Image (cartoon, rainbow, N blue to C red):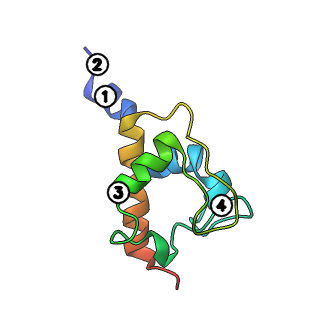
Amino acid sequence: MPTSAGAALAIPDGAAVYQQYCAECHGVDLRGTDKGPSQLSIIYEPNHHGDYAYRVAIREGTREHHWWFGDMPPVEGITDLEIEKVISFIRAEQQRLGFEQ
């Protein structure tokens, strides 16, 4: 049986998950790179791209439709728990930093 400290280490931190799987394309600051769009764009506000859209894009990839970066491939090796954590992190950062027009 894991100790509470061991169990806490097993739960991924959303910011760390983002840095591991997303930052290379979407920027360490969520503001995008030449490989992927900013997650602070108004396009990604919850009423336009809800959490379900994030889940599908992460698990299955998505075709280019708002941007010119090309199709997004599925994120290999990410767990369902990590997906939920990274979405929560992105949403918290969107709320904290606001959206870009």
Mark 4 and mark 3 lie on one chain; the one further toward the N terminus is 4
Mark 2 and mark 3 lie on one chain; the one further toward the N terminus is 2
Mark 3 and mark 1 lie on one chain; the one further toward the N terminus is 1
Mark 4 and mark 2 lie on one chain; the one further toward the N terminus is 2
What secondary structure is found at the residue carrying circle 2?
loop
Residue 57 sits above or below residue 2 on the image: below
Measured in 3D between alpha carbons, the distance from the residue under mark 2 to the one under mark 3, in whole angstroms, is: 31 Å
Using the image, tell me which numbered label, if any, was put on residue 36.
4
How many neighbours does mark 3 have within 10 angstroms: few (below 14), some (14-19), or many (20 or more)? Answer: some
The residue to which callout 3 is attached is: 51
Residue 6: percent from left, percent from top: 34, 26
What secondary structure is found at the residue carrying circle 4?
loop
Residue 51: percent from left, percent from top: 35, 57
Residue at image position (61%, 44%) is 73
Residue 25 sits above or below residue 78 on the image: below
The residue to which callout 2 is attached is: 2
The residue to which callout 1 is attached is: 7
Going by the numbered disc 1, the residue's amino acid type is Ala
> Between tags 3 and 1, which lies in front?
3
How many neighbours does mark 2 have within 10 angstroms: few (below 14), some (14-19), or many (20 or more)? Answer: few
Residue at image position (53%, 30%) is 77
Measured in 3D between alpha carbons, the distance from the residue under mark 4 to the one under mark 2, in whole angstroms, is: 39 Å
Going by the numbered disc 3, the residue's amino acid type is Asp
Going by the numbered disc 2, the residue's amino acid type is Pro
